[in-house]
Image: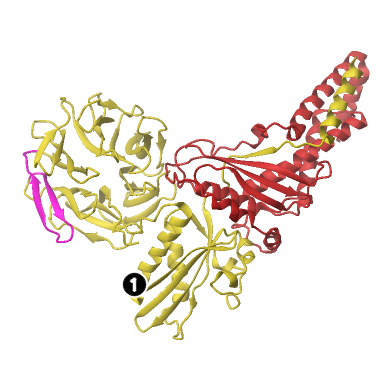
Amino acid sequence: MTKKIVFVIAFFLVFGVTAPSHGRVYIDIDSPTIQKFPLAIADFKNLGKNPDKDKLGTWFPDALGKALQVTGFFTIIQRNAFLEDPNQAGITTDSIRFSDWTGIGAESLIKGGFQVNGKELVAEFRLFDVIQGKLISGKKYTGKVSDRKDMVLKFASEVLLQLTGEKGVFDTRIAFAGKKGQISEIYAINFDGSELTRITNFRSLTLLPRWSPDSREMTFTSYRDGNPDLFIMDMSSGRARKISGFSGLNLAAPWSPDGTKILMTLSKDGHQEIYVMDFREGKARRLTHNYSINISPTWSPDGKRIAFVSDRAGSPQIYVMDADGDNQRRLTYQGNYNTSPSWSPKGKRIAFEGMVNGSFQILSIDEDGGNLAQLTTEGGRNESPSWSPDGRYIAFASIKNGRNRLCVMNANGSNVRILHEGMGGYANTSWSSRSNLY
Amino acid sequence: MTTAPLEKVSMKINDGVSINRMVLLSLVLHALVLSILFLSPSFPTRKWTFGPVYTVDLVSLPSGYLERAATTTMTKEVATISAREHATALKKTSEVPIRRLAPVRKESGREEVEKAIERVRKKVAESSSQQAPAARQGVVETNQAVHAYYEAIWSRIKAEWALPKGILPSKNLEAIVDVTVSRSGSVTSLSIERSSGNRYFDRSAVRAIQKASPFPPIPESIRGSSVDLGIRFHTAQFR
């Protein structure tokens, strides 16, 4: 009996192998091993006759590498790994031996050249796919030598567009309240941590900056006149005027995506409630009606819903309601302290600050309450998250080892980067829209 | 040292006919399971995968965007790659001592397969610790070779797949790339059989295969002038 079975199976096995098979083999691959694009940036060539006295040949690749590194999507391959002989190779497709670049693990390559004539600079940039051996994008910029960083950021944005489908956010600014001594003022800083500027000079507690959707105006709250009043500032002139001065709190909250309304928290009726003010009507309308605290509202990207914080269940939790105040429902159930919601302009996630094991961390959650994720893990306090306009980054204020800092991370919590540190405190981040510079 | 356990086993076998039978039965079962495991590639089923061994979870896929339609031009671009260029590129890697940036060990194809075969062989030797009839042993080895070959391809492509967290949409993506591998191991055709709907995802999949090729030569136990593979790339889950 047994022998028979063995024979049948043996036959079956042999047949299985030798039979001409037309079936397909499917191989399953579940996740990328390399989680950043490997990119090489060659030294730029001096295409003109004038000597390279500003060392632009290495300045360009260094500046580009720095800008792209900041995005968290690239591994920049070190120069000393390069195989290419720079004297032999050119910057065009037919003068590049792509195997020199695939051989060191690169997937993309940036090459470029420049010409300097006095103060004039012409720079060209080329992005190559070295695996397919072809040009993806090439740009030529003309300007002053002093404009060279703009050229770099423009092309870095182009690289992001080509390789990830979305332009960079190099032309955005992050506003925040910065504390010095007993007062705080509104400041703004570039995405890459450059160009810190002070926006207000009220010499009092000034907080809660909120950019308008076109970034031409900003609302904030200031104790300038003794009461926390709400102001609006024209960013080009720097002129500010009071738009809400009820007794008690007049807390600034985000603008609606179409720029016609702002949210705010007022305590004129005795406790904090959420209001919406339509600029066209000039009147504030109350959205929440109960005897608990309702604060920190934020719009959904389509302006149809509002997330906010309420302590109606005994502890501060995130709630969501329709833009007219209807259909209020609780979003967060984990932990007994969840505040500062910020709705992603893309995707359907809400970032917020929550207490996890006694420390304050940034978390994010789907707008329907699923997929809760803790984004920050370090530091005693991480607070007031704010999304970049492309939804890929979150700015937040942080205290670590007693040091205050303003940070940016990728939306999944990776690549945490310090934008600024050294002030007495950072709070209330607000990310501007793109200025379409780059 | 290693012979000791073997002696014990043979003693048990000699103990009685019933044990002998049981061992035979277990052998048959082993062969059956192995045959299903190893041979299913040659069955014309389309939903075949390697199972849990090859399942690796993507740690986190943050919210993203890029819900663009796939490019149709991709297939054309892809079809024109030259295998020779990649051959030189791979040779270079082994010469350049950049371990951090090129962490993937590029052993010569045969070595890689042989190592994998050796591993599987050991595993089987451990599980069925007595001599099987010669014919069956041969079949099992053949299957091991087939299995090891696909495993080698799998690990090579996986090691080359580069895609940053953060540029993918929150929903799961899946793309299937159709690849024909010649006897020498070079990729003779490559096309997207099913697009993920996200061209950056599709592109990264195609790049991974291009970087991973050429593959080791097809082992003799697989017949035919080429092997047709469907490489399925997917993001296991959101976050």
- Name the quadrant containing residue A423: bottom left
Can residue A68 be seen here?
yes
Q: Is residue A236 left or right of residue A302?
A: left
Residue A228 is a magenta residue:
yes
- Name the quadrant containing residue A267: top left
Can residue B160 be seen here?
no
Residue B56 is a magenta residue:
no
Colour of chain B, in one word, is red
Residue at screen point 13% across, 50% down? A232
Percent coordinates x, y for residue A109 in the rendering:
53, 64
Instruction: Identify the chain of the residue marked 1, using the numbered disc in the image.
Output: A
Residues rendered magenta in the picture: A227-248
Percent coordinates x, y for residue B81 in the rendering:
65, 57
Residue at screen point 12% across, 49% down? A231
Q: Is residue A4 left or right of residue A58?
A: right
Instruction: Please tell me whether mark 1 sits on a helix, a strand or a loop.
Output: helix
Residue at screen point 14% across, 61% down? A237
Q: Is residue A109 left or right of residue B33?
A: left
Q: Is residue B67 above or below residue B74?
A: above
Q: Is residue A364 left or right of residue B160?
A: left
Colour of chain A, in one word, is yellow
Q: Nearer the viewer, residue A86 or A324?
A: A324
Q: Is residue A192 above or below residue A263?
A: below
Q: Name the image colouring.
A: by chain
Q: Residue at label 1?
A: A147
Percent coordinates x, y for residue A252 in the rendering:
17, 43
- Counting other residues with Cα less than 10 Å from the Cα at mark 1, is it few (<14), some (14-19), or many (20 or more)? some
Q: Nearer the viewer, residue B190 or A179?
A: B190
